[in-house]
Image: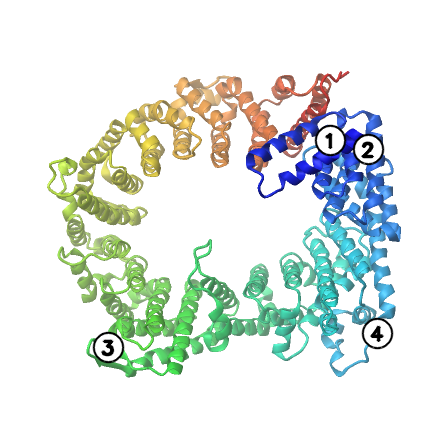
Amino acid sequence: MASEEASLRALESLMTEFFHNSTTNERKREIEELLNNFAQQVGAWRFCLYFLSSTRNDYVMMYSLTVFENLINKMWLGVPSQDKMEIRSCLPKLLLAHHKTLPYFIRNKLCKVIVDIGRQDWPMFYHDFFTNILQLIQSPVTTPLGLIMLKTTSEELACPREDLSVARKEELRKLLLDQVQTVLSLLTGILETVWDKHSVTAATPPPSPTSGESGDLLSNLLQSPSSAKLLNQPIPILDAESEYICSLALECLAHLFSWIPLSASITPSLLTTIFHFARFGCDIRARKMASVNGSSQNCVLGQERGRLGVLAMSCINELMSKNCVPMEFEEYLLRMFQQTFYLLQKITKDNNAHTVKSRLEELDESYVEKFTDFLRLFVSVHLRRIESYSQFPVVEFLTLLFKYTFHQPTHEGYFSCLDIWTLFLDYLTSKIKSRLGDKEAVLNRYEDALVLLLTEVLNRIQFRYNQAQLEELDDETLDDDQQTEWQRYLRQSLEVVAKVMELLPTHAFSTLFPVLQDNLDVYLGLQQFVVTSGSGHRLNITAENDCRRLHCSLRDLSSLLQAVGRLAEYFIGDVFAARFSDALTVVERLVKVTLYGSQIKLYNIETAVPSVLKPDLIDVHAQSLAALQAYSHWLAQYCNEAHRQNTQQFVTLISTTMDAVTPLISTKVQDKLLLSACHLLVSLATTVRPVFLISIPAVQKVFNRITDASAQRLVDKAQVLVCRALSNILLLPWPNLPENEQQWPVRSINHASLISALSRDYRNLKPSAVAPQRKMPLDDTKVIIHQTLSVLEDIVENISGESTKSRQICYHSLQESVQVSLALFPAFIHQSDVTDEMLSFFLTLFRGLRVQMGVPFTEQIIQTFLNMFTREQLAESILHEGSTGCRVVEKFLKILQVVVQEPGQVFKPFLPSIISLCMEQVYPIVAERPSPDVKAELFELLFRTLHHNWRYFFKSTVLASVQRGVAEEQMENEPQFSAIMQAFGQSFLQPDIHLFKQNLFYLETLNTKQKLYHKKIFRTTMLFQFVNVLLQVLVHKSHDLLQEEIGIAIYNMASVDFDGFFAAFLPEFLTSCDGVDTNQKNVLGRNFKMDRDLPSFTQNVHRLVNDLRYYRLCNDSLPPGTVKL
């Protein structure tokens, strides 16, 4: 025994040393190696058994259990059966003897180790595994232990991990399902017993005037008075032990519900019991009593009681999340909803708003979250099922949901509730669309609720009603979606407003517009407080209270302007005429407000609190422009109508808008406001396109400013937008006018002079500009290139989808700049930042204007690029210039993608050199690099080359297609085709999952469109190589996220030649598998059924992969020298 004793002491001191602060990493590694070697020894478990029963050191116990875990999960097959029997009997005895004294984490780990044995050996070699658990649960002394074992069994056996064969996984699930009814009735019994035992002793308070809870609403929700009475019983006060047992039982139920199907095993009495416990979460009285009694013990109890409520709600939500509900279970569901809404009413009871909010604040935060989850599941999964029950009062439910939403104590809680309303509004919208006949009836039923919702959501975004809460929102830090907390709050609120507007347009408009009007009056009234001071204009409002009120009003005006903008889409299309006067009122107000802001220059005014009021005034001005921009589609529709009637009213609207916009296009205006003005100008030029736009003096002013060489340039983004607008005014065809009235000749001359002015400095650059004896510093040259190309590229991009005439004029104006670019390109080939911008420009030209550029010039461009990108240049860009260099090569490949997609014969002569560039120059450089740079673009180019030039490889003759199946089509350029396929195959051996997914998709697309897998060359030389690679990928679990896609691809490949797959490939694949013996290979082969439909085939593939991994694991666990028969 001395050796065991000595080993234990040594182990204890090693463990203490390992976890000591001063131990070096080097020494830790030594200790770790020592421990691993000890664990690998045959019979190490005997020492561990002794350690477990003889030590009080937590680290030693944990280590010993890890040795057992490793033994059972990885080496069990090779353990002699005598040893297995000993382990099966010793570990449960150890657990029974020490479970009360062991630390909880050691006890739980020991339970898991015993369950692991059950996972391997039950029922064949460990037949009393499950009955032991049931006995533990039934014996009062060991109930908690039995429940922990039960939950662990549910976790480990119902959805076991990799290390079991599929047959064993199915067997375990079946064995567990057989036990479900027994287990559920045991758990029901435990919960009911605890409840009943404590209910008897609970003091029943006398009925107080406020406790008349079973009002009309309640009797509606619960048609059987008995259940209402049941749920009105006072909640019992549990002792700590009962509390603990109930929480374990509820945890078990929640896990069981996650995988057992909905069925009659889940009885009404079980559901009712769970609901009893869900009441613990919303029982504030018990918490108050706990805190009144003062002792900390009672406070902890109060928290524990709240936790029971959370656990019970988790059980309910597990059941709720199942979409597939058998007919016989629907009644149970209805009962569940009724009982949950009883709780919802309890939480929101009381007409005095403050107490509802304070009650929600007192509830456990997790309980409120779970309750919100329940409501979301109810609306998203079950509402359509339940709404048809006449006894279910949906409108009353919405009343409760309304109270619950608007008394949420946290912003996150409120957001979650808004999501639920959004789901409900979507449901209502789709219901109305599918039943247009009942539209009025459906809307009438919900109208009051929707109007109430709209009003309250609008109030919540206004400082006037909700200042305290709104000031808590952060408006500086951006989240993952690039918006601040305040922006997210506003956006989600406005989505709800918009959805109500879609259902009830007139109500929504008449609710919103007066509120907007009130705030506009304040804003428009500021003019009387503007006084002239020495340095300019000042706003003469100085009292602190007035400034604060003005700040709130401006913030609200800004939000309401966004709301009005969000609703623009509901005034156009079929309803244009019907809602014309409302929309006109809005647009006229917006035009008036923008002009007012620009005229009295509120953005440059001095204020008493500049850090607050100045941003407010700028924001209101910017939002009024953005709201007006949102109505550009309405203005376009009005423009069409006005064209027929030629109304002065429309002309005035547009010219007044331009008077408001023009003063803002200046370097003296803040960026936020400047960009809003530019965007509005672009929308007028692009979406509305009035014929008279160019003749408005204000627009001519902008033309003069932009083409004036001496004027200060705007910030990049604004410059690009203004140039886009001016170009579009000249290039885009006017709506409703015949071709001969479009005035193309004049517009063409004007456009040429506009582009000429914009590219003046650029066109003067010479290829020698980069040489050492240059006149201008290189940085200045780069600035000119950047500024000019960003503008020209944007102009081309915006015209690319337009009519041929517009594109011709555009190219005609650009021609000289394009030729200059091509001449400059070789000079800048070593400046990757410049090359990047030039290639961006050429890529946009190729995408938008390649027809206009004509074949000879396009060929010249492609040839120049092919000559410049030598292997050395490519290597320099990819390997030495970092991300910019890679971007340059990617843009170049993107240009070639456009070239190979061009229909017709024009660019076909370039195919050989493009393929050779890819396969002989780019591919060798990137193939071995782990970085994904350039690879995605390269493979897309190869895919497009194949997809759009199939006949370059496969000459299909008419005769061959007539005699389908007789003549095999001719193959050309076979070496290139094989090299491309080889590259695709290689990419599947690399770790980058995005590239893998993309390339698998490309192969599948080529098969769908061009029958790739059926081609003789693929079928005979590549098919099974690809299948082999894909199967190996599944076995190695390197790309597990793509399991489904890989399974389908294997099926599509195998289905070309099922006979070959089953007769030749599969046996060959199994023969080549290492780590499994012949007998196991035969079993794997036999288990792969000869199914030829997709679902069964992919199931067989995943079974094969799973079992192959399992057998390898088993074989690795056998002790060396084991003889396998």
Front-lying residue, 683 or 646: 683
| Residue on which the image places disc 4 | 203
Residue contact between numbered discs 3 and 1, judged by CB atoms under 8 Å: no
Q: What element carries label 2?
A: helix
Using the rendered image of the protein, determine whether residue 507 is visible from the camera's viewpoint.
no
| Residue on which the image places disc 2 | 87
Does residue 379 appear left or right of residue 588 in this picture? right
Considering only order in the chain, which callout, 4 or 3, is on the residue closer to the N terminus? Answer: 4
Where residue 660 sits in the image (x, y, percent)?
26, 69
Q: What element carries label 3?
A: strand
Residue contact between numbered discs 3 and 2, judged by CB atoms under 8 Å: no
Residue contact between numbered discs 2 and 1, judged by CB atoms under 8 Å: yes
Residue contact between numbered discs 4 and 1, judged by CB atoms under 8 Å: no
Mark toward the viewer: 3 or 2? 2
Disc 2 and disc 1: Cα gap in Å?
A: 11 Å
Considering only order in the chain, which callout, 1 or 3, is on the residue closer to the N terminus? Answer: 1
Disc 2 and disc 4: Cα gap in Å?
A: 51 Å
| Residue on which the image places disc 3 | 537
Considering only order in the chain, which callout, 4 or 2, is on the residue closer to the N terminus? Answer: 2
Residue contact between numbered discs 2 and 4, judged by CB atoms under 8 Å: no
| Residue type for callout 3 | His
Front-lying residue, 246 or 949: 246
Which label sits on residue 71? 1
Mark toward the viewer: 2 or 4? 2
Considering only order in the chain, which callout, 1 or 2, is on the residue closer to the N terminus? Answer: 1
Q: Is mark 4 on a helix, strand or loop?
A: loop
Considering only order in the chain, which callout, 2 or 3, is on the residue closer to the N terminus? Answer: 2
Considering only order in the chain, which callout, 1 or 4, is on the residue closer to the N terminus? Answer: 1
Q: Quadrant of residue 307?
A: bottom right
